[in-house]
Image: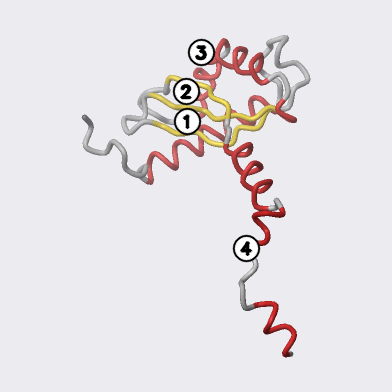
Amino acid sequence: MHKREGRTPTQRQLRVGEEIRHVLAQTLGRGELRDPELAGRAITVTEVRISPDLKNATVYIVPLGGEHSTEVLVALRRGSGYMRGIIAHALRLRYAPHLGFELDLTFDAAQRIDELLHRPEVQQDLVPQGRDEEEEEV
């Protein structure tokens, strides 16, 4: 077991992850990856988490509108070697990290929580009990 496992990432991991995210976002934005599954699709790179040894990176993506996410993910995984080469040329790292792609589900989770908080049965629990009496006195 690695001594940093389960801890927060180091500043170096955060900085390198953010640099990789910028390079990948620019690459995908310019359409440099010539894959028919990616043609005309807008893809957002939301986060890049990199291992402590900087040799492996997990790239979290969201296709615009969330449509065709499985096909987009497969295409990105196919093109990971090409993108690894772009990262190697753009950044000064000892090793270009291996790229793994995953869908970012945090937006779906946030939307679900928002929907739950706006349900009538939850809204009544969020209003403080003594609040109505105080408003009548004022």
Q: In which image quadrant can residue 120 be found?
A: bottom right
- Residue at 26%, 39% in the rendered image: 4
Contact? badges 2 and 1 (CB < 8 Å): yes
Which disc number belongs to residue 81? Answer: 3
The foreground one among 21 and 138 is 138
In the rendered structure, find residue 126 and report the number of the disc placed on it.
4
Residue drawn at point x = 39 percent, y = 39 percent: 13
Pick the quarter of the image with the N terminus.
Answer: top left
Q: Quadrant of residue 21?
A: top right
Mark before the other along the chain sequence, 3 or 4: 3
Q: Which of marks 4 and 2 is in front?
A: 4
Residue at image location 70% in from the left, 77% down from the top:
132
User: For residue 27, what is the image quadrant?
Assistant: top right
Q: Nearer the N terminus, badge 1 or badge 4?
A: 1
Can you tell which of label 3 and label 2 is closer to the viewer? 3
Residue type marked 3: Gly
State left or right for residue 100 relative to residue 69.
Answer: left
Mark 1 or mark 3: name the one nearer the start of the chain.
3
| Three-letter code, disc 4 | Leu
Task: Report, in whole angstroms, how far the alpha carbon at label 3 lies from the one at label 2.
Answer: 11 Å
Q: Name the residue under label 2.
A: 88
